[in-house]
Amino acid sequence: MEIITDPNSILHQKAKKIKKFDEKLQKLVHNMTNELFRSKGVGLAAPQISQSIRLIVIEYSPKRFLTNKELKDNKERNIPLTIMINPKITWQSKVKNTENEGCLSLPDIEVPIKRSKEIHATAQDINGKKIKIRAKGLYARVLQHEIDHLDGILLTDRINIKTDRIVFMGTPEFAAIILKRLINSPFKPYLVITEPDKPSGRGKTLTPPAVKILAKQENIETWQPKYISQIANRLSELMPDLFIVAAYGQIIPKDILNAAQFGGINVHPSLLPKYRGSTPIQSAILNGDKITGITIMKMDEKMDHGPILTQREVEVPNDFSFPDLNTGLAKKGASQLIGTIPLYLSKSVRGRSQNNENATYTKKIIKRDGLINWREKSKIIDRKIRAYYPWPGAHTIINGKKIKICQSHLENDKLIIDRVQLEGKKEMTFDEFKRGWRGNLDFLDKIS
């Protein structure tokens, strides 16, 4: 059993009422209870384990979470293990308070949420018998949180800190994924800044960046300065509240950052200070990292240098290529960003300075980086193939023809080529390529 994390469509759906109280349901409750304890949670709703039904499990024992020293000052009471099926809030107090909440489906994020201090609820137990519950304090908060899950509501949907004066800066697909999430949140930007259209393809046709395409679809005003410094005065006149930056492609000068009331925050796909610069995702793959991550940082005038607001580790599967990891990190970064913005605007999170002595830097990738040296070890070549797909593409030259290696894998440390693309042709399987190739492939014997 695995707890799913946002983004996931199940977490945004209203769960279905449970009608059968059978052995299958009992087994699910048993498994959910085990998962609740394993994950060190206080509450767990069925949609969080991919079951879109109205079932929640709650339990809180201070001994599970607090040290002996902390227990002396603890004022929260135990919440006995409670199974609630088809729960419904029947009354809630008008008196409310705001406290930070976390969520197993939004890891490493806490958001200030206002909720009723006391509620009454009805539900059914594991046998279908009606039960009534009166909850105060932590119990009431947890119960409201879990019922929200059953209604497809996440913490980020409860954010009560809003601003309609956000400027987003970003350019490639990574940034477009984050922008899409912002558009569907309380923090939709009113202006997008991206790099100019660039020639693309064999015909060198001017092509707009992914962020511009999305912004136009959403009718968001878009600026495309060649240099960000060219629009410093215009941005100052707009008096924005916040700049959000993701893979924009240029360093933002201090005078522009100061034009926004809250400055700028950046979504960076690495665990800073590791992999500062423009190619952290490719660098993680090239170096064979098992763990990378997302950093949300407050920006200063230096590259990826500012204080860290929040960070989240992300595993790197062995078979991931750049598009896989790029998309995965963008989605997780978008979710983390939505949770970090209200903390930042409400001054609930204070950035911690980066350890500059541990900083590492990535280099800009150029076309010739993709040329394969077949004397290198198989694992190094495999990493290059995955890191450099689709651009610049790991490639070799045979009989004067450029052959791009699009996909590969390792078997017992031996490199197996899966897909290739001959210059000017469509991508194909390696077997298809070999059937039509008349030259030698002696280089394959050199792979070790």
Image (cartoon, rainbow, N blue to C red):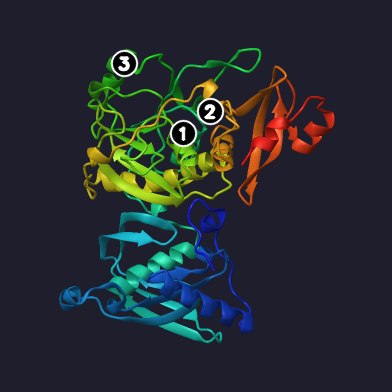
Tell me whether the residue at label 1 lies in contact with that at label 2, contact meaning CB atoms closer than 8 angstroms. Answer: yes
- Say whether disc 1 or disc 3 marks the residue closer to the N-terminus: 1
Secondary structure, mark 1, is helix
Identify the residue at horizontal 52%, vertical 32% (top origin).
173
Residue count near mark 1 (Cα–Cα under 10 Å), binned few <14, some 14–19, many ≥20? many
Residue 81 found in image quarter: bottom left
**Residue 288 visible from this viewpoint:** yes
Q: Tell me where residue 359 appears, x and y as whole percent.
A: 29, 37
Tell me, for residue 415, which label it has, or none. Answer: none
Secondary structure, mark 3, is helix
> From the viewer's perspective, is residue 414 above or below residue 245?
below
Amino acid type indicated by mark 2: Ala
Amino acid type indicated by mark 3: Ser
Residue count near mark 3 (Cα–Cα under 10 Å), binned few <14, some 14–19, many ≥20? some
Tell me, for residue 210, which label it has, or none. Answer: 2
Q: Tell me where residue 445 appears, x and y as whole percent.
A: 69, 37
Instruction: Report the quarter where the C terminus lies.
Output: top right
Q: Which residue is mark 3?
A: 229
Q: Tell me where residue 297 appears, x and y as whole percent.
A: 30, 40
Tell me, for residue 175, which label it has, or none. Answer: 1
Identify the residue at horizontal 43%, vertical 25% (top origin).
364
Q: Is residue 307 or residue 89 the one in the foreground?
A: 307
Marks 1 and 3, Cα distance to the nearest angstrom?
Answer: 20 Å
Residue 67 found in image quarter: bottom left
Q: Is residue 281 or residue 230 the one in the foreground?
A: 281
**Residue 118 visible from this viewpoint:** no
Left or right, 376 with reference to 39: right
Amino acid type indicated by mark 1: Ala
> From the viewer's perspective, is residue 232 above or below residue 431?
above
